[in-house]
Amino acid sequence: DTAVSQTPKYLVTQMGNDKSIKCEQNLGHDTMYWYKQDSKKFLKIMFSYNNKELIINETVPNRFSPKSPDKAHLNLHINSLELGDSAVYFCASSQVESPPSPLHFGNGTRLTVT
Amino acid sequence: GQQLNQSPQSMFIQEGEDVSMNCTSSSIFNTWLWYKQDPGEGPVLLIALYKAGELTSNGRLTAQFGITRKDSFLNISASIPSDVGIYFCAGQPGAGNNRKLIWGLGTSLAVNP
């Protein structure tokens, strides 16, 4: 039943490690996103894919690499994790149309880098 | 990046009180969205607004798309404890460009039973 699901929900790892977060949506949407929410709760877009094509790539370190194997999946791989990467990462999806459909968010992955 | 001016930053109210929060922008938006985030969960859409002047209700919630297209407000009537959470506004600056919403910094609401 879950519309946008992401795994894992919690991720605790040490500096320098590489980790991945997976996201899947069953809403039939053509656009998926990764957002980062910092400790002050600000939602910052990182990436957006439309039909597997990267359309938004904000100023994000190239240690972050998104991968979209199909339009229902958007994974996020992070290399050489740093303390400042600790945050909650949200996956979201929407349908680009007129008027555009709002974003549907997953429940987040809380990443803690020690 | 660009942010919306959302106020107030936080509110602490008594159960039963009405709540009002708003967002303003220096540029024109074509869409305004209001989301609520409960602890440990992702933001959930409350109300979507697509036309200037539009007034839309969802239960005890009412939101309006400002006539200048540069602002929006959200009202909650007769608050209850489950209204606790963070409320975000988001705006879309261009037609057909849902890809990059501009977000407010959130209004944290606490309700005293």
Image (tube, coloured by chain):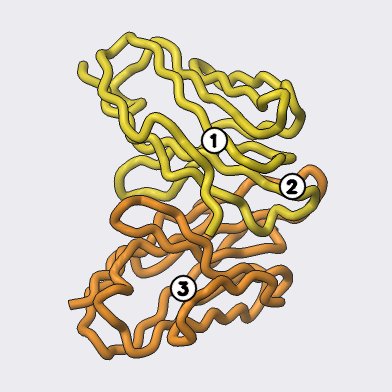
Which label number is shown at residue A100? Answer: 2
Kindly report the distance in space between the C-alpha atoms of the residues bearing marks 1 and 2: 14 Å
Q: Tell me the orange chain.
A: A
In this rendering, the count of numbered labels is 3
Q: Colour of chain B?
A: yellow
For discs 3 and 1, the disc positioned in front in the rendered view:
1
- Residue at the image position 58 percent from the left and 50 percent from the top: B102
Give, as a three-letter code, the residue at label 1. Trp
Whether callout 2 and callout 3 share a subunit is answered yes
- Residue at the image position 32 percent from the left and 26 percent from the top: B82
For discs 2 and 3, the disc positioned in front in the rendered view:
2
Residue highlighted by disc 1: B34
**Location of residue B20 in the rendering, given as x and y in whole percent from the top left corner:** 45, 20
Q: Is residue A106 above or below residue B28?
A: below
Which sits earlier in the primary sequence, circle 2 or circle 3? 3
Residue at mark 2: chain: A
Whether callout 3 and callout 1 share a subunit is answered no
Within 10 Å of disc 2 (Cα), the crowding (few <14, some 14-19, many 20+) is some
- Residue at the image position 20 percent from the left and 83 percent from the top: A14
Q: Is residue A95 above or below residue B28?
A: below
Which label number is shown at residue A22? Answer: 3
At mark 3, the secondary structure is strand
Residue at mark 3: chain: A
Give, as a three-letter code, the residue at label 2. Pro
Asked if disc 2 and disc 3 are in contact, CB closer than 8 Å, the reply is no
Whether callout 1 and callout 2 share a subunit is answered no
Kindly report the distance in space between the C-alpha atoms of the residues bearing marks 3 and 1: 26 Å
